Every structure is written in C-alpha cells, then in structure tokens.
Image: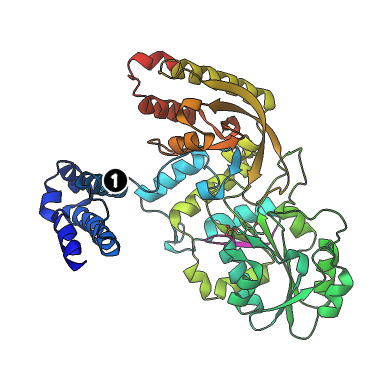
Amino acid sequence: MKEKIQNAMRNIPSMDRMLLMPWTKKYEAEIGRDSVKSIISGVLDDQREKILKDPEVPFDTEKIASEAEKRVKARAHKSLRPVVNATGVVLHTNLGRSLLAKEALEAVVKTAESYSTLEYSPETGSRGHRNDHVEWLLCRLTGAEAAIVVNNNAAAVILCLGALAKEKETVISRGELVEIGGSFRIPEIMALSGTKMVEVGTTNMTHLRDFESALSEDTAMILKVHPSNFSVEGFTSSVPREELAKLAHDNDIIFMEDLGSGMLTEPHIKYGKADPTVRSCIEAGVDLVTFSGDKLLGGPQIGAIAGSACLVEKLRKYPLLRALRVDKMTLAAFEATLRLYLKGESGSIPTFRMINRDTEDMKKQARRFKRKLLALLSRTRLRSVFLDVVPVNDTVGGGSFPGSELPGFAVSLKLPELGSAGKLAEKLRSFEIPVIAGASDDQVLFHVRTLSEKDEKWIIEGFKDMFSIDPGKAESID
Ligand SMILES: *Cc1c(COP(=O)(O)O)cnc(C)c1O
C-alpha cells in the first residue's frame, strides 16, 4: 500500500514543471506569480489527497493541468461583474436589486473622482454632517419631520431598536415575525438589539385588545413589520396603523414600522395588493418608518429612517450610528435618485420603468429579439431550433408586492441537440457575460421586461462565441 502511494505521488508534476506551461505567463501578469503558484499548489494538494484515499486513482497529468488552468482563470476573472437578468424579476436580490438611474450614476462618478462636501459646509467653512445631504429631501418626499440614513434597512431596524428600546419591551404581532432573504429574521434582530420581544395575537389574527393587554411599564415600543415576501389569505385580521398609533401615544410609547420596500409615490401597479407609501404611514401616525433604498425606491443600497424629530435626534446620538454610516458614493446616488422624485421624474428610474412597462411594447420587443436569435442560430450547424414568443408572469421581487404577478412576454428557446433546458441554461450562465434566464418545462425563457438593448447584444455576443460565428460575417444580425 505504502509503496503504491509513493509511486503514485511520484507522478504528480512538480511546481516548476507546472509553471513551464505557457498559459501561466498570461495569468502571472494578471494576478501575480505568487497567486498563480498558490492556486496550482492547491490543485497538487488535492491530487495528493486523492492518492492517499485511493492509490489506484487513475492519473492524468493533462487533467491536472487543465484543472489548474481552470482555477487560475477563474481567479483572474473579475468576480463582481455584469450579468444579463432575463428572469423578469425586476428587483432580484441576488443580481443586485435596483439598477441606478443615469443621474445617480453620474453623481457617483463625480463624487468618487473629486473631493466633495461630504462632511463640509462651504457656506460656513466648517464641518457639516453627511446626513444633511438627504434629510431635507426625505422629509419633503415623506412628510416626516426628520430623517437619517444608514447602510441598509436591516441596520436601520437594529439602530432604532437599540437606541429606543434596549432593555425594554417591544410589542409585535405574531403575524409579523417574518424572515426576509434568509438572513433577516425579526426575532433575531430584536434579540441582537437588546430589546425584549413581546409577541401578541396569532399568525392570522391580531386585535387591538391583544396589544392593549400586552403593554406594561417596561414597554418602549410597538413594532409593525411589513410582511414583504408573503401574503396571508383567508381569515385574517391586523390592527390598522391609526389605531396602533393612538394606543401607543395614549400610553407614551413609540410606534415604529419596518416598511421594507420604501415606496415614495404610488407605483401605478394594477396587479395585486399595493405596498403602502412611506407618507401614508407617517400620516397614519407612525413615529418612525424604516425602509430600503434599493427596493421599490429604485436607488442604491441604503436604509432610511423617517419620522419624529425628537426620536431621530436620539438616533443621531446613539454611538452605533457611526458603525452604520453610509459611504459617499451611495449618498451621492441616493441624493440624485431622490431629486428625480422631487422633480416629478421618478418614472425614468429603471426600477419603475421596468415595473410599468407596456405589454404591447414588450410583445414587440420579444418578436424583434426572436428574429435576431433566429437569424443568428440559423448560421450554426444546429438542425433544430425552436424559438417562440410566449406570455409569461414577471414579478417585482425584492420582497415587494408579494403574490402579485406582472403579465409580460418572453422568447422561449429550445435546442434539443444541446440537451435539456437545464443544460442550455448552464451554457448561458457560462457566457463571457453570464445570462440568467427563466425556464419552463423543457425550454429556456428570456423575459424581455428586464432586458435592455445592451443585454440583448450581450446575449447575441455570447451565442456567437459559443458557436464560433465570425463576428464580421454576423454583422447584419445586430
Ligand atoms: C427587505 C426588507 C428588510 C431588509 O432590508 P435591507 O435593505 O435588505 O437590509 C427588512 N425588513 C423588511 C420588511 C424588508 O422587506
């Protein structure tokens, strides 16, 4: 056994030999010789381990070399890079949620390449606060007295609970103990903030009297959480905001709402149950509303807190705020996005544009794209290409409008010679710019709601690479 192992080990190529392979030079220039060596060394270690487990494991130097090249190449590739979202899910959390408006992008670049007024007031020549850039805008757009921003909505909730309800009780309906996106669970967030959770009511029914009887000397807050990613159907009841606000204020406690998707204006979505706007919550008497910047608002990742001036003042003084402070590029993008709302131009924000797309327009786009794909795929050796324009259900996503479906259109594609739809979807993901498509039955679906002209080009380019179509010859296709 030992001898077998030793023999097999001797077959493993040395590092020096591996480094003689011509492809290593290219990647050394990209990520440095030490990195290349360390990745190759990992491949050789894996091989040693395989031999220790089974000395008879078939040995193939070429396979080791190609595995090494694959791993080095993967590391040399930019990791955070664009993909095509052909899923029809507008706010796809894994694909980066909102796309920024042109104005927001320009603001990011300007703020990143120059010094800025981030924490400086040119009027007085003295220190300003980074929050000042967006507070007035948020107040204008929500009707709140004061506002503050942090890294994301999760941070906003933690900050509020910590600053205002630590070591005291927070009352919440059992119907709102939600989990959002796997890592944000209300009971855990409350425990982390140091507030004592007092659950009232049941999953489907919570009444005002449940809240009333739960209040004690130790109650600091009533918390309402928007059930962002599900809807309870049937025999349900929750207490209207106005009633909770009155109860809270009569008892001198805070009424806070985690609204999730921070809608600033009515989205004109005709399908499903609409989320409330931040303004409507404030008008109903909510003292503090927290919401995300990159969901329905259509801006960068940020958490906004809008509400009563005296509570926001307490948040400003809470030391955790420093650890949650927002980066200047994010602030620049957020300010520019809010200004679009103020100007009445929120319709040009990509998230809104995609949610509100006209069905006929999508059908036309799908037909055009289908023709482009057909022209391209008929230049390949494939004998059977199935392309069609089909109606599909798109979604808003990002925990907004749960249960609502947006009727859209997709181009369906089936290439039986390449195998199943799963295989084709895998090929699409391996494109230079990965294409994430939908799937139904045995076909891949390109939902056009989330496809820009640029995305269509990227898909076409990917197919050209895949079938080695000479770009010169295929010019007429796009
Ligand atoms: C999305 C969501 C969160 C988390 O917001 P992030 O901005 O992703 O941190 C928290 N609460 C609710 C109700 C949500 O919908």
The amino acid beneath tag 1 is Lys
Residue of label 1? 70
In terms of depth relative to the viewer, which is nearer, 105 or 222?
222
The quarter of the displayed image where residue 298 is located: top right
Mark 1 crowd level (few <14, some 14–19, many ≥20, 10 Å Cα): few
- Seen from the viewer's position, the closer of residues 154 and 120 is 154
Q: Which percent across, then down, holds residue 413? A: 54, 26
Within the displayed image, which quadrant is ligand 1 positioned in?
A: bottom right
Q: Is residue 288 left or right of residue 473?
A: right
- The quadrant in which residue 248 appears is bottom right
How far from the left and from the top, in percent, is residue 16? 10, 53
Residue 145 counted in the magenta span: yes
| Residue behind label 1 places its C-beta within 8 angstroms of ligand 1 | no
Q: Is residue 478 visible?
A: no
State the residue at coordinates (52%, 70%).
Answer: 321
The reply to whether residue 223 is visible in this rendering is: yes
Question: Would you place residue 159 above or below residue 35 in this image?
Answer: below
Task: In this rendered view, identify the residue nearer to me: 173 or 247.
Answer: 173
Identify the secondary structure beneath mark 1: helix
Residues rendered magenta in the picture: 144-153
Query: In the rendered view, does 454 fall on the left or right side of 295?
Result: left
Question: Toward which corner of the image does residue 216 lie, by quadrant?
Answer: bottom right
Quarter occupied by the C terminus: top left
